[in-house]
Amino acid sequence: MPIKILAFLVFLLSCHAARAQNDVVNDDEKSSFNLNKPEREQWLKNTGAGLFIHFSVDAQLGVVISHSLVGASDDYVERFFNELPKTFNPDKFDPREIATLAKLAGMKYIVFTTKHHAGFCMWDTKTTDFNITKTPYKKDLLREFVDATRAAGLDVGLYFSPEDFYFLHANHIPISRTNVQMDAAMAQKYADYNRRQCEELMTNYGKIDVLFIDGEPKEIVKQTCWRIQPNLLITRGAIKTPEQTLPGTPITQPWLSPITIGTAWQYQPTNERYKSGTQLIDLLVEARSKGGSLLLNVGPKPNGALPEPQEDRLRELAAWYFLNHECIDSVKTWVINKENNVLFTAKGRDLYAIVTEVPDWKEGERRTFTLHSVRALPTTAVSVLGQNSRIMEYKPNADVRCTHQQTAAGLVVSVVKAQRIYDDHRWPNAVVIKLANVQPAIAEAVTVETTAAQPAAASTRLSGRLYNYKDKRVTRARFAYRAYRGRVETLYADPWQYSAWVPVGPDGCFGAPVKPPKGAYEYKAVAEQSGVAVEGDTRLIN
């Protein structure tokens, strides 16, 4: 190994910052190189969603995957490494059933945890006995996953952690994420260990499509895997992967967000809070409206079966995708990503207006929307995905046609929710209006930057700035703010509060005093352009 690479590894191992899994935002920002093929990154941009599976030997305890070893007693560590493998037998793991469900839900690939930070390998490896074949299960579970995923027509993705607590323990190095001390010889041994494991994964299981690297030393993994499989798409480690959250604004480069169905990555039998199916659908829609993909995570039970609440939510997502796949697959961003609760994706000259927050939209009820960012053409046609908008069950005389009218204020669209999805007629999920052959009414959205706040005793002055704003009919701006509940809790956060509207200065700057919530809070700048709110990214104040 070149001396420069070795020195870099030693540096990373001795001083990389500690971040619990739920606190990792995007630890690929400092990546030194990216050899992803452009066509593979384009594939990801066209891909609405993937399924993430977190599964390891400590699923038997229902605790956080791997991280309980950090700061654990010697007794806990010894029993974790020596006793848990003796009882791990995921004989109900059915990768074909999981792949079928994932495909129904619109996933185009599945990423499986080959090795998490604890170091337990879910494949038949020659590098360590701390692996699945040395358990009562005995078989190579990874091979079963790869074969089933490929047979379902989905792309095969692997998660791999080069950070390995079992290696640290076996080499008498304290288990830590903040201050792992190694000399050059041990760093070389660590790098070689990870290299040999990556060589097994990239050589023994056929074509691997996606790799998600989590932890350090990352570079030896990238070098090894791209050398053996040059068409491999590396996500974390090469591109943006904001975790447990979505970006505040659209991103033109390829990105994905790994997000859990509940709060935990691995199976947590109690004290768990699952997101509703509606929340998951809205996350998918928001990700697509901002140009990214949703990597939705599940955690099998110790026997390998999916917990029922997780399967149920995937099936709700599958029903919605079955109706509305057209607005998710191979779409691009619109000139803006949303107008209030209507989010947009686009394909050619067709626009999809995805109406969220509709639990009280009753079946048979007509609703009318004015879209300020859209202009109709003589050939424009409007429809609701999934329904023919001609017939409504048991109401032969009901007028369920879709209509549209271009006005000075915007494009007025009127549609009826006319398809029965649930027996109780209360399908609560987003309705997708297809606007075929339209054009933007706004040539380009203003760029909104949320800038640093100025805290004071009685109030805080929030500030923002606009770029590319001249001649774009932007006259006022304001701020949204709310209490910050933590990275996982952001998806369960309070509704946004808003400051008063304020004028925008000739230099594009603006500010407003607010009395924010006590403790940490988040805020974002919002500008009004041609009647449309355009948001900046979110910032955090502790």
Image: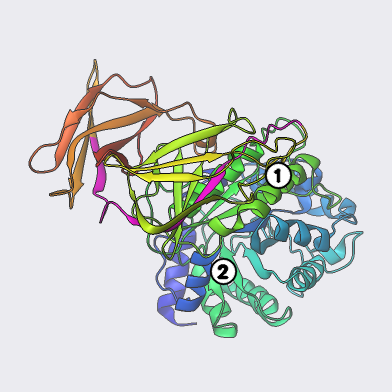
What span is colored magenta in the figure? 424-452
Residue 240 vertical placement versus 399 (above, below): below
Residue 101 part of the magenta-drawn span: no
Determine which residue is flagged by label 1.
Answer: 316
Sequence-wise, the earlier of marks 2 and 1 is: 2
The residue that appears at 18% across and 48% down in the rendered structure is 472
Determine which residue is flagged by label 2.
Answer: 186
The amino acid pointed to by label 2 is Met
Expressed as whole percent of the image width and height from the top left, the position of residue 340 reads 40, 37
Foreground: disc 2 or disc 1: 1
Task: Describe residue 404's horizontal placement relative to residue 48 as left or right.
Answer: left
Is any atom of residue 298 visible in this view?
A: no
Is any atom of residue 96 visible in this view?
A: yes
Q: Badge 2: few (under 14), some or many (20 or more) residues near its Cα, within 10 Å?
A: some
Expressed as whole percent of the image width and height from the top left, the position of residue 156 reads 67, 70
Q: What element carries label 1?
A: helix
